[in-house]
Image (tube, rainbow, N blue to C red):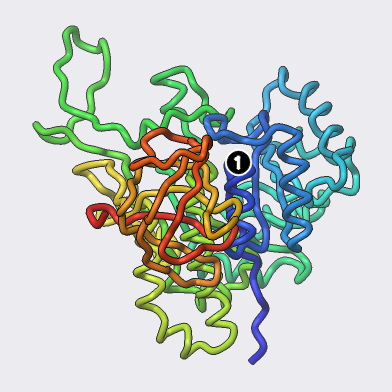
Amino acid sequence: MTRKKPELLVPASSLEVLKTAVRFGADAVYIGGEAFGLRAKAKNFSMEDMAEGIAFAHRHRVKVYVTANILAHNDDLESAEEYFRELRDMKPFPADALIISDPGMFVLAKRVWPQVEIHISTQANNTNYGTYLFWWAQGAKRVVSARELSLKEIREIREHIPAEMEIESFVHGAMCISYSGRCLLSNYFTGRDANQGACTHPCRWKYAVVEETRPGEYMPVYENERGTFLFNAKDLCMIEHIPELLEAGIDSLKIEGRMKTALYVAVVARTYRRAIDDYLEDEEKYRKNMDWYRAEIAKCTYRQFSTGFYFGKPDETSQIYDNSTYVSEYTYLGIVEEVKDSLARIEQRNKFCAGDMIEIMKPDGSNVPVTVEAIYNAREERVDSAPHPRELLWVKLSHTPEPFDLLRVQKGLR
């Protein structure tokens, strides 16, 4: 049976992470500019970096989508119009699509940039085929399914929409406790609006029993005497269910994480890339390699995994009440930018020392254990350790890496 190859869509918070996503297997990357996206705390892209990133991706036959998915207010519209003009006129290439949730922003983008492909964000609450057909009639090419949908519901949507219309669904990453991401907690507690891109993630806070100083002065959260992480959802992971995702008719498998590191993006992109390709080549091969997928996907930061709403509504086992700490087995050291005379140049991200045992993570799926034989700073002085973040270093390893290889170290094994 011939199976349609789905798109692997990967997030990027910066130019470095975009290049990592491209090298480690993404078919498309989604990014945010400095305004109008829902990740204002992410590094995001200047117009210059965006132009460079799109050009880099296109050279590797990878698409780039730009988020403009805030729920806009009146004050946003005039500057959004100018922003869409800048994106339209970007050289050498504009983005391949815009991701939008607000109908006003949709109309504005279509007026300014008629030929642009528009994808409707999950923030628009896309829970039924009627909604998909509505956006198709407006000229949208793709709709991102609400995270509250089951695979059964997605299959039903596929049966009722045109074959040319695309379904995009999240398959990995953090789960928002609020319906399709529409949260008021952050605004209520801190004045920072999640629907304008400034979420402070109060769903990850610890809530404790408190005593009212005056009746009705405030509403405490009652759970138990120790307190609780009341809203803290497990992360989504569908690496074991690639066949079901494709059989449901999903065209684009989306990874969450526009605030994550290059290590997270490299690990998740590489693992899903291999799982998808293995399944399309031979389902038995995919099944045999399952232990590798599970082991590799656990090497990025995560909060424990669940399958979200795909196989039924989540229950209490989909929450983590006792802590909000990420599981993190590996530390990100840097990406190899250049190799010269067997020395690798990196911009260091975390401390490591000469003599440490680290690992080269390669885009082809292999992991190469190596020893750090020597470290040289930018002045070509040999040093024993690299304690300063973002320091430019030349590193001698027991096995010479290649450009775009990623260096990481397993915690406790240096």
Q: In the rendered view, tell whether residue 365 sits above or below residue 18.
A: below
Looking at this view, name the residue that lies furthest to the top.
214
Looking at the rendering, which quadrant does residue 1 occupy? bottom right
**Residue 200 versus residue 30: which sits nearer the camera?**
30
Q: Quadrant of the C terminus?
A: bottom left
Looking at this view, name the residue that lies furthest to the front.
381
Q: In the rendered view, tell whether residue 42 sits above or below residue 235.
A: above
* Residue 182 placement (x, y as % from top left): 51, 37
Q: Amino acid at mark 1?
A: Ser
Q: Which element is circle 1 on?
A: loop
* Residue 48 placement (x, y as % from top left): 76, 35
- Residue at image x 87%, y 45%? 92
Q: How many marks?
A: 1
Q: In the rendered view, tell whether residue 320 sits above or below residue 381.
A: below
- Residue at image x 25%, y 12%? 216
In this view of the protein, can residue 231 be seen by the observer? yes
Q: In the rendered view, tell whether residue 231 sits above or below residue 7.
A: above
Looking at this view, name the residue that lies furthest to the left.
225
* Residue 111 placement (x, y as % from top left): 89, 37
* Residue 74 placement (x, y as % from top left): 72, 20
Residue hosting label 1? 14
- Name the side, left or right, on which 213 lies relative to 178: left
